[in-house]
Every structure is written in C-alpha cells, then in structure tokens.
Amino acid sequence: MTSMCTLGPGWEHEQDMLSRLAPAVAKSTRVRSLADQLFVRARSFLHTDYEFLMLADAKGSALTGLAAHGARAESLQQEHIQTVRELPLLVTAFQTQQPLGIANFAHDPFISPRLQRKYPDWQRTWMLPLVHGKQVIGVLGVGYTTQREIAPRQFRLLQQLKDEATQALTPRLLTQVLLESCESCSPLKNDSRQKERQWRDFLSTFAHDIRNPLGVVMGYAEMLIEQAQEKGVSEGIDLLERIKHNALLVHALVSNYLDLTRVETQRLIMMKQPLALNEVLRRVGQLYEAEARRRCVTVEWQLHPALPLVDGDPLALERVFANLLHNALKFTPATGRVTISSTPQGGQVIAAVADTGPGIAPAELPWLFEKYCRATCSLAHEGTGLGLFIVKSLVEAHGGHVTVQSVPGQGACFRVVLPVSTSLPPVK
C-alpha cells in the first residue's frame, strides 16, 4: 500500500514506533489526563456512550488503541485495526481530513465482520481523523448505543475536541512523553524517595480513575436537566443541578490534585499552540453555565472581538479559568454578578474574572497564591487551598503572570496576563 499522506523526512519510523508502543504511551500521566479531559467534555456536552483515541502508523494503514471509555472500553484499549481491510471508509477520511459518520457501526457493510462482532452494541459512531498538515496521527471517536444524532452546536464542540487532540498528539510530543515514562521507571537510589514516588503515583492514578465516573454523572445530570427543560417540567431540576454541582466540585478538587502532583514532580508538560483565548473562556463558561443558574448568579461577558492569539496549552488554560470561575461563583451571593472579560494591551492579552462577592482583606493578598493558603472569607466554603496555586503555576508555565485586586465588601478581580503569540496559527 502506498502512503496516503506525505510526511516529513524521518517521521515515518518514529510514527510507526509510537504506534507499536501505544500501550506504553497510554500509561503516561499526560496522555491519560488529555484523554480523560476530552472524554469528560464529550460525555458532558454530547452525552456519548463511548469515546476512544487510537494512534495510526505512518501510512494510516493501521490503528492501535491508546485510550477508551464507556461501552467496550477494555477491548478498545487493546484494539489493533488494519484500516484498509477492516475500516476502508477511514482511508477517505484521512485523505479528506473530514469526519466519518457511521449510521450503524455493527451493521455497516463497509466494516469488517470481526469489528461488527466485537462491538455489537455500537450504533451511531463518529470517527474524526487526527491529521496535522499532511501527517496522519490517529483517530478520535465517539458514539452511541442508540440512534442518537448530534446537533450542529454539539458538532462544533466535537470539531474543537478533534483539533485539541491533533495538536496534543503530534509524534514529537508523544516521543517526549514516552521517554519521560521510561525515565520514571528507572530505580531510585534513595528507598524513601522511591516509596514516596510510589505513593504519589498511586494517589495520582486513584484520582485519575475517579474522574471518569464523575464525568458520567455530570453528563447524565445535564442530559436529564435538558430533557426536563424541553418538556417544561420544573420538578426535580433543582435536585439534578445539585447532583451536577457536587460532581463538578469533586471533579475540580481531583483535577487540582493531579495538577499539583505534576507541578511538584516536574512532570508539567505544556503542549502549546496558537489559540484564541476567547474560545477557551467560552468553553469554560459553558461548563459552569448550569452552576451559575443554580446559584442565581448573572454571568456577564465583555470579550474583545479582535483579541490576538496566544501560545498556550488549551487544556491547561481551561484549568486556569475553570478554577477562577469556580471561585468567583462560589463567593458571589445570589443575585450577584460575575464578569468575564478579555482585552489586548501592548504585546499582551489580559483575561479577567471579576465577582461581586465579599472581597479579600489587603493583608491576605500577598500570600493568596501560596499552596494550601485560604483567605479568611473562604473558610466557610469547601476547598483545599490548591486552586490559586495551580492557577499561578500554569500561568507562569505559559510565560505569563496573574494578579488580583480586591476591596473588602466589593468583590475581587483576578487578571491573567499572557504574551501574544509569535507563531502562525496551525494549518487546518
């Protein structure tokens, strides 16, 4: 078979190696975190029954399971597909870089009998080719066990997830992940340090595994809320929003712990790309839309329409603004207001989250971003004191900084300052 995509010199061998070593790559905390966040967002907004990532060899002629969740997840993570023989429709998708929609996976005549037998409960399935320029990387897939359709606004989110996965899973970055994974397996001379790392890795794995069922809880709660609203039923919506609120809270706490372990073990890897910060802010706002309604807080938007691009890791920046927005909603009283804004300033972009809460005492501002520190006004609320420390660490990893202004009784305003991108946007 001839290569359907012409790659740069030297990439073919590396991509083939990564495809064969997909199980080792999948063990990386960074890759697991990426897959987890993509899958959680798919379940939360698309209500999918299964999600998966697969790596391709250099020609796109074979796919190897990287990560999966939902129906048949265990089989998917160990799956190896000969694309041309078993899934020929995907060859065209790689060539055109267009999504592949399969109406009924288990009965489609262009899908091999082996795959049909292995995934009999799959129906409506979407496979999105991950192709960077002309370089085949893999596939992001989502689907349903019923004949459910994806609305146009939901499909736009699916395209965003595909773009993020494409940028994050380039062979060069996956190779870096693989090397780091190998280094982490080296024996440590100091036995106490080895035990500490083993304990930290155990907690990190435990926290990672918690996030999957939490994503399912949030997704189903949101689906039931939408169905009740469509039918004009108000009874029970408040309880569903409380369920989603608590799942969102635990998800934020677990995510902060995972980020903390990466910062402290120097495993924080930024996969930066030129991106529009307004899109990141809107995605985070959408995630907390139901929470704002539950708290009777108005969210106002003041986004500059011509904001320059920044060089950033989209998932890391989402964590930054998720922490800030979560805090703003938590401290803003009912009928209060949270304002999300963005503006260019010289060679920088400033994104701010302001609230009308109780504010922060001036004496507490200097140490507000330290680990485990909590302002006096926050002691009556749930939290660990890690959120702002994570915000500061992630922003500084982007070459930026974060500031806070507050007047007691008049609320607080957190500003994230990031340098404008010096790179061209990725080719799509």
Image: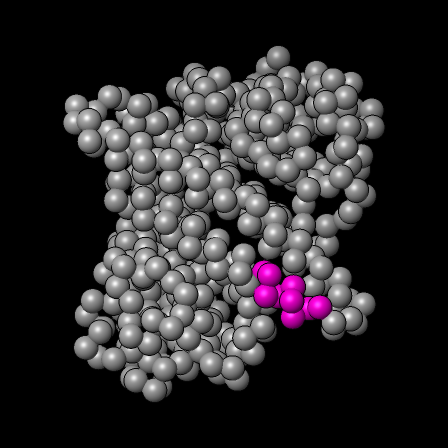
The outermost residue toward the top is 1
Residue at horizontal 59 percent and vertical 66 percent from the top:
242
Residue 82: image quadrant is top right
Note whether 81 is above or below 225 in the view shown. above
Is residue 323 or residue 11 the one in the foreground?
Answer: 323
Q: Main secondary structure of the magenta part?
A: helix
Residue at horizontal 60 percent and vertical 22 percent from the top:
79
- Residue 333 placement (x, y as % from top left): 47, 81
- In this picture, which residue range is highlighted in magenta? 236-244
Note whether 208 is above or below 177 in the view shown. below
- Residue 8 placement (x, y as % from top left): 43, 25
12 to the left or right of 109: left
Q: How many marks?
A: 0
Note whether 213 is above or below 54 in the view shown. below
Is residue 309 or residue 424 the one in the foreground?
Answer: 309
318 to the left or right of 224: left
